Amino acid sequence: MKRTHRRRWEPRVTDLAPQELRILVAVADEGGFSAAGARLGTSQSAVSHAVRGIEKKLGAVLFERGRFGARPTPAGERAAAHARRVLRMLAVLAAEVRASGSGRLTGPLRVAAFRSAALYLLPPALERLAAQHPGIEVEVTVVRELGAGTAAEVAAGRADLGIAALTGAPPSGLVGGPLLEEPYALVHPAGHPDPRGLPLVDWAENCGSHTREWWAAQDWLPPATVRAEDDGAVLSMVGSGLGMAVMPALSLTGAPPSVEISDLGPDRPYRGVGYLTTPEGATTDAVRALIRVLRSLGRGPALTRTRVGAAQSRSGRPAVSDSRKSE
């Protein structure tokens, strides 16, 4: 009689349960097993035991342990990002199945955006989204556009959709598209006879790859002598007479009467603004709904020209025009 040999069962990555993914994310977010246990309503020892099991299944050390708590290794950061995204898709699965009969979209939609986009681009879009899909609960996080910026929030699974300064193709692993191109303009104290002779006020997020080449070619632009936390602080400082600044149109929305906005001419730089999401996020109903709204809002650059023009009309100077109108 021929004997058959059964293969010994071995843990596989596909055997990771949703609760294990939640534990992985909680430890990465909280920076320790005790804090993760408190967040999940379980003990420190249970979290520690679960993490050891996850590491065994994945075949990698995910956290450095020490007095500082638990710090994700590079493998742990990557695992936590995937875990967030898998958990998000499980939540989407439930929401979209429930909505299949009624057609009513429900559940959270997490959006990350840089400051001026969160202040001036998102509100009308979210107002329209709420009118169309009142069951969607939007959570907005303001992210500084430094380094990976908004893209990092999306890639790490902390946001479903990001509004980012976007030039060229989306970062690797993400998908996206353009929303608008906003022109830069010179902003200075109202009535100043020689605005280009003033000190330069700037902030760290301003000079990205989209403006660096133009910036370097401007002999009249001095190095910044005053630096601020964000574009709102820069605009306030300019209005107080501390200097001039070169700013994109969204940042100039609602500019106070104490400043004037002057055209930088036909060679003015532009900042591309677009949306980013994950390949799996792009298939979800809520993300697709917000993208449609963002694309439909007045052909973004035209809306921006109107706002900048309104600010300039107070000074009688010509409006910043966009010579590259959307077709």
Image: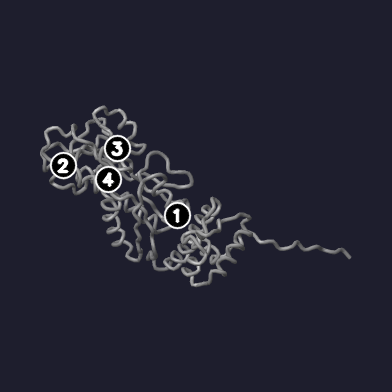
Disc 1 to disc 2, how far (Cα)?
Answer: 46 Å
Q: Give the mark nearest the N terminus, 1 or 2.
A: 2
Occupied quadrant, residue 66: bottom right
Q: How crowded is mark 2: few (under 14 residues within 10 Å), some or many (20 or more)?
A: some
Q: Tell me which residue sits at (39%, 65%) in the image.
A: 107
Disc 2 to disc 4, how far (Cα)?
Answer: 14 Å
Disc 3 to disc 2, how far (Cα)?
Answer: 26 Å
Q: Tell me which residue sits at (44%, 66%) in the image.
A: 95
From the viewer's perspective, tell me whether residue 260 is left or right of residue 156.
left
Q: Give the mark nearest the N terminus, 4 or 1.
A: 4
What residue would you read off at disc 1?
281
Question: In the rendered structure, are the residues bearing label 3 and label 2 in contact, judged by CB atoms less than 8 Å apart?
Answer: no
- Between label 1 and label 3, give the one nearer the viewer: 3
Q: At which x and y percent is residue 33?
A: 52, 65
- Return the residue nearer the eye: 259 or 228: 228
Q: Give the mark nearest the N terminus, 2 or 4.
A: 4
From the viewer's perspective, tell me whether residue 125 is left or right of residue 161.
left
Q: At which x and y percent is residue 292?
A: 34, 52
Residue type (three-letter) at the residue carrying disc 4: Ala
> Which image quadrant: the N terminus?
bottom right
- Between label 3 and label 4, give the one nearer the viewer: 4
Disc 4 to disc 1, how far (Cα)?
Answer: 35 Å
What residue would you read off at disc 4?
228
What residue would you read off at disc 2?
241
Disc 3 to disc 4, how far (Cα)?
Answer: 21 Å
Q: At which x and y percent is residue 222?
A: 26, 32
Residue 155, above or below 91? above
What residue would you read off at disc 3?
270
Residue 15's tag is none
Residue 135, above or below 181? below
Q: Tell me which residue sits at (85%, 64%) in the image.
A: 3
